[in-house]
Image (cartoon, rainbow, N blue to C red):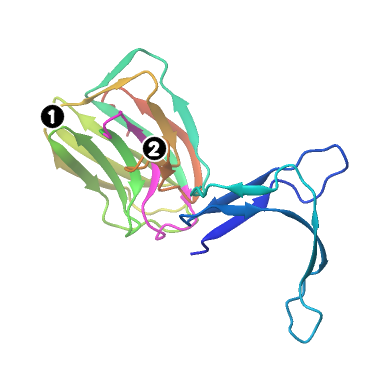
Amino acid sequence: MVPLIGYSDRLSLRPGETIEFKVSSHADERYKAQLVRSICADPNPAGPGIIEEPVEAEFSGYYPSRKQPFYPGSYAVVPLTDSSLALNGFTLIANVWPTHAAKGEQAILSLSDDNGLGIVLFINEQAQVTLRIAGRQGLSEVRISQPLKNRRWVRLWGGYDEDAKELSLHLEPLENDSSNLSATSDVDWAGVHFAAGNEILIGARASQESRDVKDAHFNGKIEAPAIYGRSLDVN
């Protein structure tokens, strides 16, 4: 871990333009910011060494240390605008083309409330497609045991049938003649109520540490994702 790291938001600028410096420090004490003109940046002891000249700048001075973590990965956010949304039965559908299926947990579709309760369709650490529901009574999930292959389109659909008390998951290969795969699990799920401000995430999920942080980013392509508020037969 580098205790102090920083960068500028642009590599060059002209007089009168603005440049910003981003700094993250894991230290407890303050750090010093200073603008210098670099005469020689070669640390080779056989040469002249590093030579710098201080340049007057408005930002020069000491600043309190602050950790600014970086969370790489892209995803789509669909905010819920209704005052309330109750999901008892549901169906999730998506076509996916993974490029690194065995990388670790990767979310395809997710929806959770302020308490972390909700639904997530994801690839687990064994590259198995998994559908998980989290309710006040705990976690329940169903998975397809055969791992996904990289760079192969598959159609996924799954959901919860509140009448049958069943959680199901299905996989249909779209690029070869392989057979469809399915898995089911008997579950008694009470459903989840979502409020305005909750989000549907495509290609990520809300972190357990903070809803403002997204993790489990999906590596690959996601096509035609959909969420329905009831159990559907999509065969």
First to last magenta residue range: 97-116
- Percent across and percent down for residue 22 are 62, 47
SS at mark 1?
loop
Q: Residue at x 36, y 52 (%)?
A: 105
Residue 101: in magenta span: yes
Residue 152 visible here: yes
- Residue at the spot x=31%, y=18% of the render? 85
Residue farthest along the right direction in this orientation: 15
Q: Position of residue 121 (x, y in %)?
A: 33, 41
The amino acid pointed to by label 1 is: Ala
Q: Nearer the viewer, residue 49 or 78?
A: 49
Badge number at residue 12: none
Could you say where residue 147 lies in the image, as x and y percent from the top left?
34, 58
Mark 2, other Cα within 10 Å: few <14 / some 14–19 / many ≥20 = many
Q: CA distance from mark 1 to mark 2?
A: 23 Å
Evaluate if marks 1 and 2 touch, with contact meaning CB atoms under 8 Å apart.
no
Could you tell me the amino acid type at mark 2?
A: Leu
Magenta span has 214?
Answer: no
Indicate left or right for 115 with 82 as reference: left
Q: Residue at x 15, y 27 (%)?
A: 190
- For marks 1 and 2, the one nearer the N-term is 2
Residue lying at 42% horizontally and 36% vertically, measured from the top left: 212
Q: Which residue is mark 1?
A: 164
Q: On the image, numbered disc 2 is attached to which residue?
A: 109
Left or right side of 166 for 5: right
For residue 94, what is the image quadrant?
Answer: top left
Tell us which disc is closer to us: 1 or 2. 2
Where residue 69 appears, x then y in whole percent? 49, 49
Helix, strand or loop for disc 2: strand
Q: Residue furthest bottom?
A: 46
